[in-house]
Image (spheres, rainbow, N blue to C red):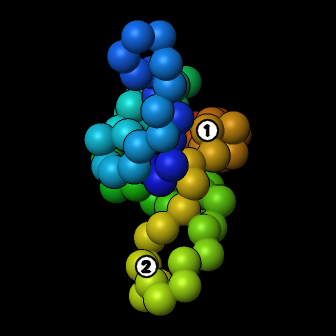
Amino acid sequence: GDKIISSWTRGKYHEMSGTSMATSHVSGSIALLLAQNPDLSPAEIKELLVATATPLRPRKGQSRVVHTGEINAYRLLREGMKRKNNPS
């Protein structure tokens, strides 16, 4: 997660970055996905996450990472329903 606004001490908010900031968004989206399609395998979940993520442009001076993107829960769930109806 990059520049995620989160609750902070004394009722304030703070912008933070790191995998720990993205974990709750990703795991929550996967939980919703599995609630609608519990038969998905871990490989299928990863494939759907990568395929439905909104691509991010690398920052200046940053090398391109293969699987970077912002999770798009709506697209993930929509594509997950298609997979339920038409397994690969």
Q: Is residue 50 left or right of residue 80?
A: left
**Label 2, on which residue?**
66
> Residue 41 at what x, y percent from top left?
34, 45
Q: Is residue 37 left or right of residue 81?
A: left
Asked if 50 appears above or below 27 in the picture, the reply is below
Q: Residue at x 44, y 70 (%)?
A: 67
What SS does tag 1 mark? helix
Mark 1 touching mark 2, by CB under 8 A? no
Asked if 35 appears above or below 3 in the picture, the reply is above
Task: Assess disc 2: are there few (<14), some (14-19) or many (≥20) residues with their C-alpha within 10 Å of its C-alpha.
Answer: few
> Residue 51 at what x, y percent from top left?
58, 62
- Separation (CA) of disc 1 from disc 2: 20 Å
**Label 1, on which residue?**
73
Q: Residue at x 63, y 46 (%)?
A: 72
For residue 40, say whether it is visible.
no
Q: Residue at x 42, y 79 (%)?
A: 65
Task: Assess disc 1: are there few (<14), some (14-19) or many (≥20) residues with their C-alpha within 10 Å of its C-alpha.
Answer: some
> Residue 14 at what x, y percent from top left?
46, 33
What SS does tag 2 mark? loop
Mark 2: which amino acid? Answer: Val
Return the residue nearer the eye: 43 or 87: 43
Asked if 60 appears above or below 23 in the picture, the reply is below
Mark 1: which amino acid? Answer: Ala
Q: Which mark is residue 44?
A: none
Q: Residue at x 50, y 25 (%)?
A: 13
> Residue 73 at what x, y percent from top left?
61, 38
